[in-house]
Image (cartoon, rainbow, N blue to C red):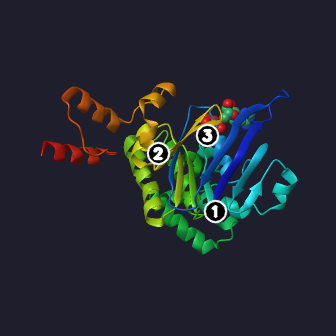
Amino acid sequence: MAIKFERVSFQYRGIDEKGYLALADINLSIAAKGEFITLIGETGSGKSTLAQHMNALLTPTEGRVHVFGVKLTSDKKKNRRQRLNPIRQRVGLVFQFPEYQLFEETVLKDIIFGPKNFGVGQDEAVERAKKMIKVVGLDESYLERSPFNLSGGEKKRVSIAGILAMEPEILILDEPTSGLDPMGRNALLEVFHNIHEQLGKTVVIITHDMNTVYEYAKRVLVLREGALVYDGDPSGLFSRKHVEDWNLELPEILRIQRALEERFGIKLDKSPRSRKELIEALGEVVG
Ligand SMILES: Nc1ncnc2c1ncn2[C@@H]1O[C@H](COP(=O)(O)OP(=O)(O)O)[C@@H](O)[C@H]1O
Ligand SMILES: [Mg+2]
């Protein structure tokens, strides 16, 4: 396993002595290839904290995290003695707030910062920047602009391009589509989907959007108050019990499918995950 959590807890040190328990006793394994995972949970449930443990930006206060063979514990000295840089390149994390990642005077400099930091030469880094700015749906003219004059959605895309340019093996995206319009959101999700499908990379997306969970994820993780309460496939997640207990919103496709059943007695043979699949499944029933 590329990433393995063993009984991981994490406490933020607060102003008072007690601190705040953000992760509680988490066990979790993530493979280096072939996974498409969504991580969901209410605001404050620990999603960003969990993501930052996956590339050793944070290290546990209890338990162990293994990332590509490096073992991280509460022993800060031991953690520092290990080579953490390679981990940060191999597990790319796009922050929830792009401002954390953008600080250079041009978009180009921001995108090449990561790859150059990990030993990629200037020319190759610039080539990657030109490629990745297009991958995230912007054109080359953006490379000379200041990241500070971009819209929220554009900043987000630039920060994603910067991580893609490091060519990580595992890609973790903390709410990558929040604040984007539906078109931009779908386009970016297709980008992540292609990275997963064509390159076989493991992708982990933190999201509040149940449609994303249902259409794209092969596996869903649910955090509640720092505890991992669900680790399984998306269809199991939307069983009546979980939906009620965890106050989940149903994905659009599932809502339509259930309405078809209850109101018109139309039972689909398949479980469609997208609008396209829903229309195909309906077509088969209608004949
Ligand atoms: N730097 C910090 N210091 C103290 N508490 C923090 C810090 N960052 C986050 N927290 C707290 O830890 C909990 C989990 O935060 P976070 O991982 O950001 O949740 P999520 O990403 O699910 O919204 C929250 O209650 C939050 O207030
Ligand atoms: Mg967060």
Q: CA distance from mark 1 to mark 3?
A: 20 Å
Are there few (<14), some (14-19), or many (20+) residues within 10 Å of tag 1? some
Is 143 drawn above or below residue 188 in the view shown? below
Amino acid carrying label 2: it is: Asp
Q: Is residue 81 above or below residue 63?
A: below
> Which label was assigned to residue 90?
1
Distance of label 2 from label 3 (alpha carbons): 18 Å
Q: Quadrant of residue 260?
A: top left
What's the CA distance linking mark 2 and mark 1?
Answer: 26 Å
Q: Nearer the viewer, mark 2 or mark 3?
A: 2
- Local secondary structure at mark 2: loop
Ranked by sequence position, the earlier of labels 2 and 3 is 3
Say if residue 256 shows up in the picture: yes
Which residue lies at the image location 42% right of the left edge and 45% below the top edge?
185
Quadrant hosting ligand 1: top right
Residue pointed to by mark 3: 47
Residue 68, horizontal then vertical, whole percent: 68, 62
Tag 2 residue: 233
Q: Are marks 2 and 1 in contact (CB under 8 Å)?
A: no
Taking the spot 41% from the left edge, 41% from the top edge, the residue there is 235
